[in-house]
Image (cartoon, rainbow, N blue to C red):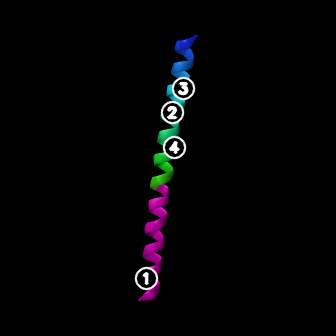
């Protein structure tokens, strides 16, 4: 029973970390698009 709980917690941790990295990467992409739009509007 303890092995099953440990395995479930480990899997949840991996998914949480992977999701966090994905959201972080998406935020960087949005930021770059915003910067490109801002620089093109200033020209």
Q: Which mark is residue 17?
A: none
Point out which mark residue 19 bears. Answer: 4
* The label number, if any, that marks residue 40 in the structure image: 1
Decide whether the magenta segment is chiefly helix, strand or loop: helix
Which of the two discs, 4 and 3, sits closer to the camera?
3
Q: Secondary structure at mark 1?
A: helix
Q: CA distance from mark 4 to mark 3?
A: 15 Å
Assess whether mark 2 and mark 3 are in contact (beta carbons under 8 angstroms).
yes
Query: Picture quarter containing residue 2?
Result: top right
Reading the image, the residue beneath label 3 is 9
Q: Which mark is on residue 13?
A: 2
Image position of 12 with respect to 29: above or below: above
Helix, strand or loop under label 4: helix
**Marks 3 and 2, how far apart in space?**
6 Å
Q: Which residues are magenta?
A: 26-43
Label 2 neighbour load within 10 Å: few <14, some 14-19, many 20+ = few
Residue drawn at the location 47% of the way across and 85% of the way down: 41
């Amino acid at each position: 029973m303890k092995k099953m709980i440990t395995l479930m917690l480990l899997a949840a941790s991996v998914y949480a970390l992977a999701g966090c990295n994905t959201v972080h990467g998406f935020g960087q992409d949005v930021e770059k698009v915003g910067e490109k739009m801002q620089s093109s509007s200033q020209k």
